[in-house]
Amino acid sequence: SESPEYAETKKGTKKRTRNTEKYMDAVCKLPFVSELDEGECGHLAGIATVVTLKKGQILIKQGKKDDSLYILIKGRLQVNRGTGGGEHVTLACIREGEMAGEMGFLDGSEHSATLLADDTTDVLQIKRKHLESLLDKHPQIVYKLMRAIALEVHEITKRMNMQYVEMSNYISHQHGRY
């Protein structure tokens, strides 16, 4: 097993966990993890990895599987989806403090969109197997994080429903009832 002093990045290079802990302090101040105390944040820091992307690099590719949860620490990610004809459309932007990859993390499903770095971007990566390693000794951490994921998915669903209604209203006003 790897020394707890180091964590592996997505590219296979090593970064000191201290960097992760520095970012974890910032993450613990965000609303979706406000239920975690300092000790619980420290346990999460022990299983997390910081991934740094340069502008244009892909974090998640549409159609691929990845069992990691990502939390944006610095920068911005574009959420792009292929249209089928070789074109891509930007659906949204993920900003600092927001999660990405929730569904793949939960159920191992293929990602429905590609996430692309808008600029130099740092994300905190938590792999499902690493979170599961906390189940025996720290089940409350796992529960709190899963609850935060459920709330995030709920917010995304509400936002998508609102956008659908807006689009339906726009089409209805432009072209009459359909």
Image: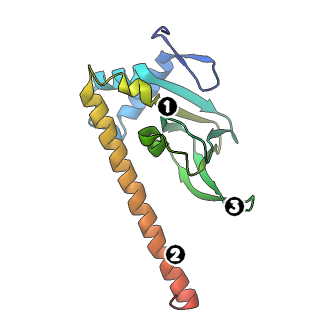
Name the residue: 50% across, 90% down: 177
Specify the label residue 124 is tagged with. Answer: 1
Looking at the image, can residue 148 be seen?
yes
Say whether disc 3 or disc 1 marks the residue closer to the N-terminus. Answer: 3
In three-dimensional space, the C-alpha distance between marks 1 and 2, rounded to whole angstroms, equals 34 Å
Q: Amino acid at mark 2?
A: Met
Q: Amino acid at mark 1?
A: Leu
In three-dimensional space, the C-alpha distance between marks 3 and 1, rounded to whole angstroms, equals 31 Å
**x, y percentage for residue 33?**
33, 37
Report crowding for label 3: few under 14, some 14 to 19, many 20 or more residues within 10 A (C-alpha). Answer: few
Report crowding for label 2: few under 14, some 14 to 19, many 20 or more residues within 10 A (C-alpha). Answer: few
Say whether disc 1 or disc 2 marks the residue closer to the N-terminus. Answer: 1
Specify the label residue 167 is tagged with. Answer: 2
**x, y percentage for residue 135?**
30, 25
Name the residue: 64% across, 25% down: 11
Residue at mark 3: 84
Contact, CB < 8 Å: mark 1 with mark 2?
A: no
In the drawing, does residue 96 fall left or right of residue 144?
right
* Numbered disc 1: secondary structure: strand
Contact, CB < 8 Å: mark 3 with mark 2?
A: no
**x, y percentage for residue 79?**
58, 51
Name the residue: 38% across, 62% down: 158
Q: Residue pushed farthest right? A: 86
In three-dimensional space, the C-alpha distance between marks 3 and 2, rounded to whole angstroms, equals 21 Å
* Numbered disc 3: secondary structure: loop
For this rendering, which residue is in front, 81 or 14?
81
Vertical order, 46 against 95 (above or below):
above
Q: Amino acid at mark 3?
A: Gly
* Numbered disc 2: secondary structure: helix
